[in-house]
């Protein structure tokens, strides 16, 4: 009976016994509100981007094989890919500088202001775009199907990068994917420093 009373008191008062160690919140990958364009709006707990400009994820891709997705909620001008912390988050579209590699809404792939490729299938509203990256190439998937148009030559510490303009709205998935990632690929892991 005494333990029941103690438990009830803890829940009511928020007090805990001696030696209690509070649980830490497990870090999750989401859109980073510290690395976002001035006119970008981040909602849905860091999972939706709208407004005008770009945002990076709060974690770089450090593991060997990573995967993430976007769902195109509203069309407009948008892009998805990778960028360093130096990429122009207030400039739309990404891919115009040396620090971003993106797929744009019309299926073109850009880096450093140059078109590096073009998808044969152009994504539409409601489609889910998957992105895989293994530090050698970035690949895209449309509704789970590989598009076989790799993006090569990506350098540096990169983060998932997204931009929107002209009414575009993107929902970002860093886990609990719509489609199965390719073999060996998984959600982005946040590096933890060991004490």
Image (cartoon, helix red, strand yellow):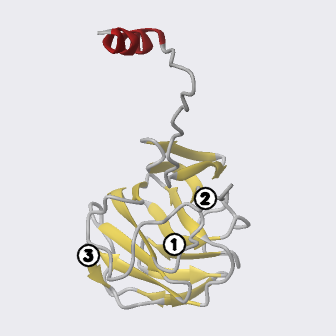
Tell which residue pokes out farthest to the right in this image.
86
- Marks 2/1: CA–CA distance: 24 Å
Dot 3, crowdedness within 10 Å: few (<14), some or many (≥20)?
some
- Marks 3/1: CA–CA distance: 17 Å
Quadrant location of the N terminus in the rendered image: top left
- Do the numbered discs 3 and 2 sit on residues whose CB atoms are within 8 Å? no
Which residue is depicted at the point 43% across and 55% down? 168
Give the vertical position of 23 relative to 29 (above or below): above
Q: Position of residue 185 (x, y in %)?
A: 39, 77
Res. 152 image quadrant: bottom right
Between disc 3 and disc 1, whose residue precedes? 1
Q: Nearer the observer, disc 2 or disc 1?
A: 2
Look at mark 3 in the image and give the residue it sits on.
144
Q: Position of residue 9 (x, y in %)?
A: 41, 9
Dot 1, crowdedness within 10 Å: few (<14), some or many (≥20)?
many
Q: Which mark is residue 192?
A: 2
Q: Secondary structure at mark 1?
A: strand
Look at mark 1 in the image and give the residue it sits on.
81
Quadrant location of the C terminus in the rendered image: bottom right
Q: Position of residue 17 (x, y in %)?
A: 51, 19
Q: Secondary structure at mark 2?
A: loop
Which residue is depicted at the point 50% across and 57% down? 164
- Do the numbered discs 2 and 1 sit on residues whose CB atoms are within 8 Å? no
Q: Is 33 placed left or right of 169 in the picture?
A: right
Which residue is depicted at the point 54% across and 39% down? 24
Between disc 3 and disc 2, whose residue precedes? 3
Q: Which mark is residue 6?
A: none
Q: Is 7 placed left or right of 100 in the picture?
A: left
Q: Nearer the observer, disc 3 or disc 2?
A: 2
């Amino acid at each position: 009976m005494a333990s029941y009373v103690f438990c009830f008191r803890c829940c009511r008062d928020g007090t805990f016994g001696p030696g209690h160690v509070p649980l830490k919140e497990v870090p999750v990958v989401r859109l980073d509100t510290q690395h976002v364009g001035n006119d970008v709006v981040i909602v849905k707990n860091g999972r939706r981007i709208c407004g005008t400009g770009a945002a990076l994820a709060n974690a770089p891709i450090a593991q060997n094989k990573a995967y993430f997705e976007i769902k195109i909620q509203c069309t407009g001008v948008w892009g998805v890919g990778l960028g360093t912390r130096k990429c122009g988050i207030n400039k739309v579209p990404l891919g115009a500088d040396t620090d971003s590699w993106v797929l744009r809404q019309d299926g073109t792939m850009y880096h450093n202001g140059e078109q590096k490729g073009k998808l044969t299938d152009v994504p539409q509203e409601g489609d889910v775009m998957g992105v895989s990256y293994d530090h050698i190439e970035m690949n895209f998937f449309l509704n789970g199907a590989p598009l076989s148009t790799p993006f090569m030559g990506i350098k540096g510490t990169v983060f998932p990068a997204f931009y929107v303009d002209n009414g575009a709205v993107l929902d970002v998935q860093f886990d609990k994917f719509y489609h199965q990632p390719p073999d060996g690929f998984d959600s982005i892991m946040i590096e933890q420093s060991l004490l």
